[in-house]
Amino acid sequence: MNNNFFIKYEYAKKMLETELDILIHSFELKHGYTPVEHMKSRIKSISSIQKKLERRGYSYTEENIEKHVTDVIGVRIVVSFLSDVYDIVSLITHSTNIILKERRDYIANPKESGYTSYHLIVLVPIYLESYVEYIPAEIQVRTVAMDFWASLDHKIRYKFKEEIPEEVQVEMKNYAKDIQKLDRKMYHMNQIMNKYQ
Ligand code: 0O2
């Protein structure tokens, strides 16, 4: 593996962070409202990349990373209300500086575990000396409530590593449903609040 292989991912992460900062800031100026609670980005660790490739039956090579791992760059945007998720998704998908490759609405279609979030795979251009390269990145957009569930779920997965006990899985799925209900109630409450502004 070439030592410089991950540098292009660092460049693309910076490009993406800047683009997202500008998009979100311009949204705030236009609407006089801050939908984003926090935003975090990371480069996936080498051991996580190795595990992901292994899980999918590929060896750890530059070519396989480029072809099969679309979340070497990951950005998580945590917002207040359900409607903010869709506003932020629309903002990103309408950007002319990044290309939408794929979208997965795990809010409309939760994962088997109960996980909810909106995922976008985008291509970020990086301008090198004589050519442009497009680097993939995964953007996860979710509410504070979904983020709370996902971070506890992540801890549970880490604790049990292989097989999560059935009763824990069932409980977590139920909590995911509770969280969805709560998000809908908060959205409704926000609509009521807006009437008074
Ligand atoms: P990490 O450490 O967060 O980076 P798949 O092949 O379907 O398993 P794929 O193609 O990578 O997965 O895409 P998917 O499912 O759209 O998104 C994967 C990422 O979503 C995960 O990344 C998690 O961040 C998050 N995610 C998906 N399902 C769950 C879940 O049940 N619980 C939690 N807590 N997070 C989930 P990684 O690479 O698995 O891990």
Image (cartoon, rainbow, N blue to C red):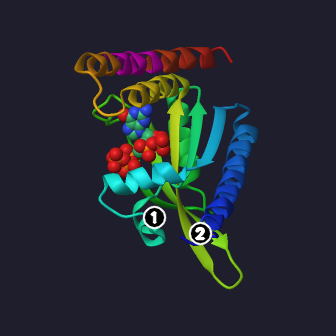
Residue at which label 1 appears: 65
Furthest residue to the left? 166
Ligand 1 found in image quarter: top left
Point out residue 60 in the picture as x, y percentages from the top left corner.
Answer: 43, 63
Point out residue 114 in the picture as x, y percentages from the top left corner.
Answer: 33, 28
- Local secondary structure at mark 1: helix
Count of labels shown? 2
Point out residue 110 in the picture as x, y percentages from the top left corner.
Answer: 33, 34
The quarter of the image holding the C terminus is top right
Q: Is residue 19 magenta?
A: no
Furthest residue to the right? 29
Which residue occupies the foreground of this view, 36 or 41?
Answer: 41
Mark 2 and mark 1 in contact? Answer it, CB < 8 Å: yes
Which residue occupies the foreground of this view, 4 or 68?
Answer: 4
Query: Residue at the spot x=66%, y=65% of the render?
Result: 7
- Can residue 118 be seen in this snapshot? no
Residue at which label 2 appears: 5
- The secondary structure making up most of the magenta span is helix
Quarter assignment of residue 13: bottom right
Residue 151 has which mark? none
Mark 1, Cα crowd under 10 Å, few <14 / some 14-19 / many 20+, is some
- Local secondary structure at mark 2: loop
* Residue range of the region highlighted in magenta in the rendering: 174-183
Query: Residue at the spot x=64%, y=62% of the render?
Result: 12
The three-letter amino acid code for the residue at tag 2 is Phe
Marks 2 and 1, how far apart at CA: 10 Å
Query: Residue at the spot x=70%, y=56% of the render?
Result: 14
